[in-house]
Image: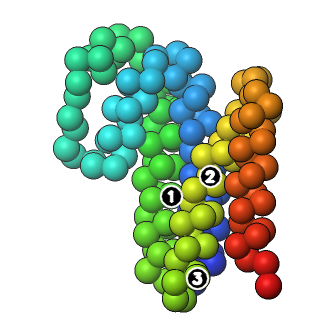
Amino acid sequence: MNWIIAMSLCFILWSTYAIPGNFAEKVHGVSVNMLFETIAFVGITILLSGKIYEGLPRVTAGSATLGLLMGLGSAVGFYFFLAALSLAPGTKGIVLVVLVAGITFPVQSALFSFFGEALSLHQWLAIAGMGVSLIVYNWK
């Protein structure tokens, strides 16, 4: 695997992992999603807060599955992010990995809009600005 593949896989996973989490959050709330992401990252060490305990009774099989998918996507994406950083050639490659990882959050917002989440004009402008920053950074 080279750094471009690792960066691309990180981008894809980090851009999309929150979509199932967003659907799950509508069923069982954001604090339970935090639990699923913690399970995926830490594996056997689970630290729960009082707010997470409050949401546990609302967990359904479907929301648990979606939350688990979100957690796994986040954790595996983080692995590829670290792999891309370690494989990137020089400072410019590392900066590009960080820029691409940073744009995953605006891409998530754009993807949410396709599932009915309304985005404001300033959010769309921020997404466009991130895209322009990648183009400007790589301009030769």
Quadrant that contains the C terminus: bottom right
Dot 3 crowding, Cα within 10 Å, few <14, some 14–19, many 20+: few
How many numbered callouts? Answer: 3
Quickly name the residue at label 3: 92
Precedes in sequence: disc 1 or disc 2: 1
Residue 1 seen anywhere in this rendered image of the structure: no
Dot 2 crowding, Cα within 10 Å, few <14, some 14–19, many 20+: many
In which quarter of the view is residue 126 placed?
A: top right
Q: Cβ–Cβ below 8 Å for labels 1 and 2?
A: yes
For numbered disc 2, what is the local secondary structure? helix
The type of colouring in the image is rainbow
Depth check, front residue: 75 or 134:
134
Three-letter code for the amino acid on which mark 2 is drawn: Thr
Q: Which mark is residue 55?
A: none
Q: Which mark is residue 104?
A: 2
> Which x, y percent locates residue 102?
57, 56
> Which x, y percent locates residue 127?
73, 46
In which quarter of the view is residue 52 placed?
A: top left
Quickly name the residue at label 1: 77
